[in-house]
Image: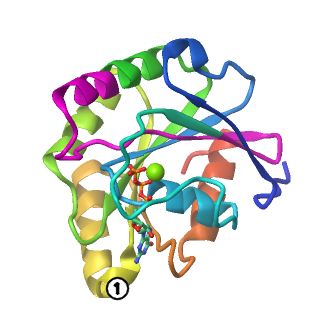
């Protein structure tokens, strides 16, 4: 399967379970703390600066945003967690939407948990991992913003996570466009049903 990663379209935002996309595409999700770089990574993958909206202030919009790559692969930009200024009501809404999403969404191949390389794994990331395991969902880790720290430190952090979970970690920098090929290869392998 040849995928043109530059060919991407925004399909929709889902604010409630009735809006989830029920289409026959393999789905890859981007999860992680607010501000970790989920939207930036989607833009980096598709070489599109403005497709997924990014912002310096953590997102208040709680929705699942779907992007279709080359009519073949669906990327779901999930609302971030851990934003301290979010109200209790908003946190509840996030939880409900995510619970509904992982139960209802068809075709999820893998969930990427993005980890800020300056911060490392947080308590909330571990809760997310446990939850995905409980739901029998596949997951993989991606380190983001590696341009912000020494590459040796990023590699060390990746090794720590790799030994903790027995999975390889993908290092990325949306700013420097690093890790793009590796992530694309990983996704395409998964779509083909190969182990990675
Ligand atoms: N230096 C650097 N900054 C980055 C990188 N990726 C994202 N950022 C910056 O980090 C901030 C947050 O990026 P987003 O992509 O909006 O983060 P997000 O995870 O989608 O955030 P929410 O949608 O609020 O959950 C923005 O100011 C980005 O420009 C990166 O690789 N390097
Ligand atoms: Mg975002």
Question: In the figure, residue 24 lies in which quadrant?
Answer: top right
Q: Position of residue 136 (x, y in %)?
A: 39, 23
Q: Is residue 196 magenta?
A: no
Q: Position of residue 98 (x, y in %)?
A: 38, 25
Question: Quick check: 176 left or right of 102?
Answer: right
Question: Quick check: 176 left or right of 97?
Answer: right
Question: Which residue does the image show at 68% across and 18% down from the upper left?
Answer: 22
Query: Where 72 sits versus 43, above or below?
Result: above
Question: Which residue does the image show at 52% across and 62% down from the upper left?
Answer: 40
**How many numbered marks does the figure carry?**
1
Disc 1: which residue = 151
Give the quarter the ligand 1 occupies: bottom left
* Residue range of the region highlighted in magenta in the rendering: 67-95
Nearest the eye: 193 or 73 = 73
Question: Which residue does the image show at 42% across and 60% down from the upper left?
Answer: 37
Q: Position of residue 87 (x, y in %)?
A: 19, 33
Nearest the eye: 57 or 155 = 57
């Amino acid at each position: 399967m040849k995928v043109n990663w530059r060919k991407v379209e925004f399909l929709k935002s889902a604010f409630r379970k009735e809006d989830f996309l029920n289409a026959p595409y393999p789905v890859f999700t981007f999860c992680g703390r607010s501000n970790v770089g989920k939207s930036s990574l989607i833009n980096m993958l598709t070489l599109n600066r403005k497709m997924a909206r990014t912002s310096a202030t953590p997102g208040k919009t709680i929705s699942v945003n779907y992007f279709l790559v080359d009519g073949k692969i669906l990327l779901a930009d999930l609302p971030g967690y851990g934003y301290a200024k979010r109200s209790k009501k908003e946190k509840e809404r996030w939880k409900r939407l995510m619970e509904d999403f992982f139960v209802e969404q068809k075709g999820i191949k893998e969930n990427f948990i993005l980890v800020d390389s300056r911060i490392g794994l947080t308590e909330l990331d571990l809760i997310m991992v446990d939850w995905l395991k409980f739901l029998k969902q596949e997951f993989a880790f991606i380190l983001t913003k590696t341009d912000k720290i020494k590459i040796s430190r990023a590699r060390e952090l990746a090794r720590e996570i790799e030994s903790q979970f027995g999975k390889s970690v993908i290092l990325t920098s949306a700013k420097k466009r690093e890790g793009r090929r590796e992530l694309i290869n990983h996704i395409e392998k998964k779509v083909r049903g190969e182990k990675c």
